[in-house]
Image: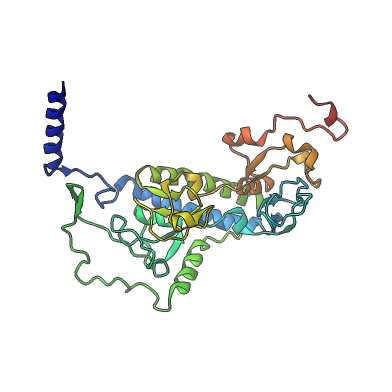
Amino acid sequence: MLRSSEREARLKKKERQKVHEITLQPPENGLLVEQLIPIAHEVYAARCELLSSVSRLVNYTAIYTCSLCGEVHVGHPPHKIRTCNVRGSPSSKEHIWVKGGVEHVLPLVESFHLYDRIGRAVSHTEMLEVDRIPAIVELCVQAGFDMAEYPTRRRAFPVYCVAGRIFDFEKRFPKGFSLGKDIDAHGFWHKKKRLDEDTHSIVMHSDDIQGIAVQGMTAWEKMRTGASKLMEKYAVQTCGYCPEVQVGPKGHRARNCKAYKHQMRDGQHAWQEATINDLVPPVYVYHVREQQLGKPLVNELKRYYGMLPAVVELFAKAGAPVEKNYECTMREDIVIPEMDEEKWVV
């Protein structure tokens, strides 16, 4: 029995010493997944339309955010539910509401832009030298959407993995290629401004608020569905301690994690596979029903209230129908009692 196990161990050792080529499939071999290129264009277009719709609707519907804990409420008046439980909050746990905006409904999640997605990771010393763009835009770029100000390497020939090492036989830069020829020489802020202009290029001149809300709801679902399809092939990493996201097969090496006990890890991130909610976080807010419009939600009845993503709640208030997959969180089937009836509820 011992000799047979020793024999098996020797065979395994010899097998490990052999040089094997591991066949890589797109996009691991550096090539694009052809059938996902149209989806990348659709996701980017849906994001532009979504931001345009939200920027129009925030002028008609009030957005509130707590200045202490960051909780968001869509609509006026803001709720009176006492859930503010952070350092510096009052003993009553009541929120201190201030006016919010688009960035509170659709929070921006950024990622380092990679010129070569299968190249080496961004190091800590390069942290301030590499551009950061919205993570969903970086996902579209890596999946085949080309942006002049954020060039990325498109290979014509695949890379090879031999004995665990990556071999690239293609020239790094084609003849006549200039890495910065399409980039504004005035720096990052001009490039970021141009990206914002492209994002808001879809201008809705219609005053049909319900129509804008319906278009925005469709764009929201299309963006999330398309991004989920892209993430099945194109890896996205997130930190297990903080909300940091990196689009690509591996996370960056910048030591900027500020989560609990980050000193013990020297600020290093703990990378794991991301989900669509890490890439496009839905900020859940309390759902206000039609019969409750104009009345603040009270703390005593909070267990009867439903919740929705802030952007969905914004579109619903403007008249857009809500998808069926949100019915379980809306809790429309639950009857909210009056204050004098609540004590009799079992």
Query: Relative to the observer, which residue lies in front, 170 or 199?
Result: 170
* Left or right of 271 on screen, residue 164: left
Q: Is residue 111 above or below residue 161?
A: below
Q: Is residue 222 above or below residue 135?
A: above
Query: Relative to the observer, which residue lies in front, 264 or 38?
Result: 264
The residue sitting at 35% across, 52% down in the picture is 250
The residue sitting at 27% across, 48% down in the picture is 28
Residue found at the very far bottom of the displayed protein: 186
Q: Is residue 14 visible?
A: yes
Q: Is residue 206 visible?
A: no
Residue found at the very far top of the displayed protein: 1
The residue sitting at 61% across, 58% down in the picture is 102
Residue 132 x/y as whole percent: 44, 63
Residue 46 x/y as whole percent: 49, 52
The residue sitting at 72% across, 46% down in the picture is 83
Q: Tell me which corner region of the image, top left, top right, bottom left or bottom right, holds residue 300.
A: top right
Residue 158 x/y as whole percent: 20, 52
Query: Relative to the observer, which residue lies in front, 295 or 343?
Result: 343
Q: Is residue 191 above or below residue 115?
A: below
Quadrant where the image shows the N terminus: top left
Residue 22 x/y as whole percent: 19, 43
* Left or right of 1 on screen, residue 109: right
Quadrant where the image shows the C terminus: top right
* Left or right of 230 on screen, residue 78: right
